Amino acid sequence: MRDPDDMAHLYTGLTTVHAQPQPSSDILATIFAKRQEDVAAQKALPGRSPADLQALLSLSVAPEPLDFVARLQSPTMAVLAEVKRASPSKGDIAANAAVEYAQAGAAAISVLTEPHWFKGSIDDLRDVRLAVGALENRPAVLRKDFIFDKYQIAEARLAGADSVLLIVKMLSKAQLKSLLAYSRELAMEPLVEVNNAEEMAVATEVGAKVVGVNNRNLRTFDVDIGNTKQLADKVAPGTVLVALSGIATPADASIYANTGVGAVLVGEALMRTDDKQAFISGLQQI
Ligand SMILES: O=C(O)c1ccccc1NCC(=O)[C@H](O)[C@H](O)COP(=O)(O)O
């Protein structure tokens, strides 16, 4: 488990007995370091300090949240449709399609808010929430980012998020617990992302109610959609299990039928397809 403070030292030239040198190809560590700079800069803006955000939360100005877990629990496969303009592995992809996703029956819209590699922003999330907010049985809105600071969770809630992503690989257990508790304080059950059995055990230990298994290896970008299926029997009973990444067609996702996988998250393939309705319906029929 890696402590983000240790990771930060790798990029500030400081040495520490805890820090493990990372290969330059470790995109997660590189993105993480950049996000630390971004969050520090954001906090320094007038009206955007942590105290400012706390004051806004106390005034109850954040849009009403919905129950993320309940929204994912459906008799059919739940679909989390991702707004992903670009990515480190694929470059530019497409423009925002949130309303189409909602109309096609997505249970959640995942919004990538990281600006440098994914060309997203918290404004994208705010716009998505505004666009779907008045729809009947609206989809949940998930902040997909590299979250290590309560500030990012407060920012997400104020912009209208119903959930946030917490990536086990980039957080210490203590940080994961603390961020999970804070997210729940703000009425957002987080999506906890794991990639292997060891990380699944951590997610179970901290009591995650929604666990996403990433099929993409963030070091090599290799994708194995069987990864979620392989880890499915390790998830705690009652947990919503989400398959993340690499699903190119509804037929791909059929490997998750009768495995305990309750939801699938699709980014690039949905962004690129013209018939989003057919794609989402196909996933729901698994
Ligand atoms: O998508 C990437 O290339 C990527 C690289 C490094 C860190 C994270 C990355 N993606 C974030 C995601 O979680 C995916 O966008 C999401 O699971 C959807 O994946 P896909 O359906 O394959 O677009």
Image (cartoon, helix red, strand yellow):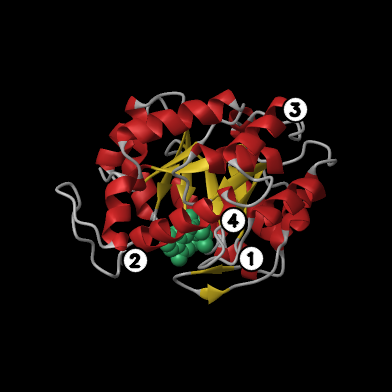
Question: For this view, does 14 lie left or right of residue 68?
Answer: left
Give the foreground label among 3 and 1: 3
Q: Is disc 4 placed on a helix, strand or loop? A: loop
Residue labelled 1 has its Cβ within 8 Å of some atom of ligand 1: yes
- Looking at the image, do the residues carrying marks 1 and 4 touch, with CB atoms under 8 Å apart? no
Ligand 1: does it lie within 8 Å of the C-beta at label 3?
no
- Mark 2: which amino acid? Asp
Kindly indicate whether the residue at mark 4 contacts the one at mark 3 (C-beta within 8 angstroms): no
Q: CA distance from mark 3 to mark 1?
A: 34 Å
The answer to whether mark 2 is within 8 Å of ligand 1 is no
Q: Label 4, on which residue?
A: 113
Residue 60, numbered label = 3
Disc 3 marks a residue whose amino acid type is Ser
Mark 3 neighbour class, 10 Å CA radius: few under 14, some 14 to 19, many 20 or more? few
Q: Residue at x 52, y 52 (%)?
A: 39
User: Marks 2 and 3: in contact by CB < 8 Å?
Assistant: no
* Kind of residue sitting beneath label 4: Thr
Give the number of the mark in front: 3 or 4.
3
Residue visible at 65% across and 45% down? 48
- What is the three-letter code of the residue carrying label 1? Met
Q: CA distance from mark 1 to mark 4?
A: 16 Å
The residue nearer to you, when weighing 79 against 209, is 209
Q: Rounded to the nearest whole Å, what is the CA distance between mark 1 and mark 2?
A: 20 Å
Q: Earlier in the sequence, mark 3 or mark 2?
A: 3
What label sits on residue 222 in the rendered view? 2
Location of mark 1 (residue) = 271
The crowd level at tag 1 (other Cα within 10 Å; few <14, some 14-19, many 20+) is many
Q: Mark 1 or mark 3, which is nearer the start of the sequence?
A: 3
